[in-house]
Amino acid sequence: MANLTINGKTFTLDVEPDTPLLWAIRENAGLTGTKYGCGIAQCGACTVHIDGVATRSCGVSVGEAAGKKITTIEGLASGNALHKVQEAWIAQDVPQCGYCQSGMIMAVAALLNEKPKPTDADIDEAITNICRCGTFQQVREAIHTIASA
Amino acid sequence: MNKHVSPRMNRRAFVVGTAAVGAGLAIGLDIPFGGPAVVRAADGSPEIGAWVVVRPDDTVVIRIARSEMGQGSLTGLAQLVAEELECDWSKVSTEYPTPGQSVARKRVWGDFSTGGSRGIRSSQDYVRKGGATARVMLIQAAAEAWNVPASECTAANSVITHTPSGKTTTYGKVAEAAAKLTPPADVKLKDPKDWKLIGKGVKRLDTAEKTTGTMVYGIDVKLPGMLNAAIKDCPVFGGKLKSYDEAKITDMKGVKKVVKVGDTAVAVVADTWWQAKTALEALPIVWDEGDNAKVSSESIAKWLAEGLDNAQPAYVGNKNGDAKAAIAGAAKKIEAVYSYPYQNHATMEPMNATALYTADKCEVWCGTQNGEAAFAATLEASGLPAEKCDVHKVMPGGGFGRRGQTDYVRQAVLIAKQMPGTPIKLLWSREEDMAHGRYHPITQCKMTGAFDADNNLVALHYRLSGQSILFSLRPEALQNGMDPAAFQGVAQSGEAAFGYSVPNLLVEHAMRNPHVPPGFWRGVNVNHNAIYMECFMDELAQAAGQDPLEFRRKLMGNHPKHLAVLNAVAEKIGWSTPAPQGIYRGIAQVMGYGSYVAGAAEISVTDGNKIKVHRIVASTDPGYVVNPAQVERQIAGSFVYGLSALFYGGCTVKDGKIEQTNFDTYNSMRINEMPKVESVMVPSGGFWGGVGEPTIGVAAPAVLNAYFAATGKRIRSVPLRDQNITFA
């Protein structure tokens, strides 16, 4: 059993401590917005915030995440008010298949938290998620739109 | 409010009844189309023809048979219907009919297959007619209610107006009456100059859920009592499962069952997928790998190279004059050999499907590019007849051709069949996905070009050796053994026609089919043919001492549409003016999927092997552009997919297996490597071309030609990873 704090709620989950956080989130807590892409922290589809830091949840165990504040894509909005990144993603029509976008949005939200007006170089350094559809152009434009708002 | 289909909506039973009994009884079979019965959606709203449901509140549901997988066809197809329907776009939502429903209604929604960039171009006519038919019926119903001639009525924005009197009504108010009318036998479609919605870059209909984590992909399907399965198929293609030691893992937490899947695979079923995967990794498995275990990339390359020998048999795909004789008698000739590797689609979401099998029913939930193929696989694997099966399409996390295949559907059904009554979600690990792709076919190409004394190109011999996709996946489409699709981009005519006039031309294919299963990989045979032809065109230009653009132009006089897109990129990139200091340019053009495309790149190279792509310009003429915002995204996305393939995309074979296992060994471009793509759309009208794939063809040759301009070195083998060339 493990206690995880996800999106402000405490989950008591029947899961081994060495289970990757990704799978505890998806299968035990039932929050499927966080996606599986590679399982080896390469693609970023599973990005969540752990104590505010963008983290690839497939590479963190449940044991390591216990006691920390975990935010998933489902917890990014404040009630019915979408996060500014989600709003920008809708305004710019960023997603194609959309599968990588939960992780992309979480990575971008963390970047903007740290650097509200990121340069292209900041974006290049911080956003390392894979998108096979190739939405990078819209991702970059949406970030700049938020930053200039 | 636009709402994309969800599994719940997909599961809606269609109901049929008469207006008198309202929503009537739920059935799904043999509904007579156009008969007296009104066909109703599950909420009781009437169909006005198979493509349109109009609700009393004027909202409209448009049925979409093709699959959305990110390419935007769902929105584009809805635009086509709505254009003719003359409905209020802000009240449009979409819905997938299931393949089972379609088959039961004599395939009223036509082809479900979503590949070959055909989603819009090969259904545009009948879906527009579906919208027009519904509009005519709605107007007719209003006219009858008013007792006026329909010819005096017009429709716009879901409002019908009787022009002489100024009376108005709305679609929702006359839908019930319209649904009872016999559909008109023929309808006239609008002249393209009158389009209001087609050609507009309206927002996609399926974006919001993709930003909140609520969009349901196959991996997210949840059913009551569902268990999860992880699978391992014999890593050597063609090998078999010999044995496994189930006792070693049956006590592991969550494990419910270990099952054989066909002759080649074993799956572990557990409470959670992580438990299933963990147990599967601990399961001792013995494979019978067979003779294919002796095959390697080297042995395949050697076999393909032998096919380049003119003495070996080959199929002729395009020919005029006598290329061999002209080459033999030429003043000057050059020759080069190129090669292209296996590549995995690497969709972000690995293959998966959920199946529920009971004694009298089998249902599947999955992302698929071809609902009907998934349906056929369900029938075959379950052994149940069509009326007892169905497939519910959910959003795929990428397709790129991979999800046109149904291997994962078949596996899910075969597992579920061994646990009747329990829904089973089968999910491949990324490693399984890398090991069991349907790979971009492997080829080599020897090209020989010959010049007369004035440096005019007088002959070209294009000799391809390698794998045929159709041989493996659609043998019925071979023509006396020849794979006509092998000549995409270098064909004599048709939707992928060669864009140059060469007096003596021979294009041929020595078919060699290694054991690695090939598949339709976004762009398909255009990818390698465009690299071979467009890079060799640059070599020919250099041999002739001419500018690569001017050299091409001289050969393109009889190909004005090919030339127009090439000219468009040349102008946009500024070909006639020198590039900035340290920047080098490359250019390429090809025709594929009925569209003409060209691309140009500006790059810099440091240390001879570090490439920075500064600028990309792309042009396309798809005839008509339905949604320019989405076409622009397909063009940019094609460069990401195509340049990922150029730099990183190679699957190598050792001991009969694919060596790459995950994104650490099979990388994909990131945002820092990708410049903005400047697209120039030059739709010339009069034909319908595809947009999802053709542009990929020009991505790699544009950059490779720029690399030559920068370094003087020709790269004739990809990926660049294996040439020790990286992004800067």
Image (tube, coloured by chain):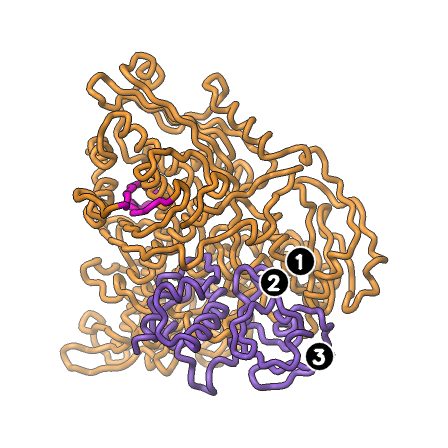
Instruction: State the residue at coordinates (41%, 48%).
Output: B643
Residue behind mark 1: B413
Mark pair 3, 2: CA separation: 33 Å
Residue A60 visible (yes or no): yes
| Sequence-earlier tag: 1 or 2 | 2
Q: What stretch is highlighted in magenta?
A: B582-606
Looking at the image, residue B496 sits to the left or right of residue B555; the answer is right
Q: Identify the amino acid type marked 2.
A: Val
Q: What element carries label 1?
A: helix
The numbered mark 2 sits on a residue in which chain? B
Foreground: disc 3 or disc 2: 3
Q: Identify the amino acid type marked 3.
A: Ala
Numbered circle sitting on residue B364: 2
Colour of chain A in the image: purple
Q: Identify the amino acid type marked 1.
A: Val
Q: Mark 3 touching mark 2, by CB under 8 A?
A: no
Q: Mark 1 touching mark 2, by CB under 8 A?
A: yes
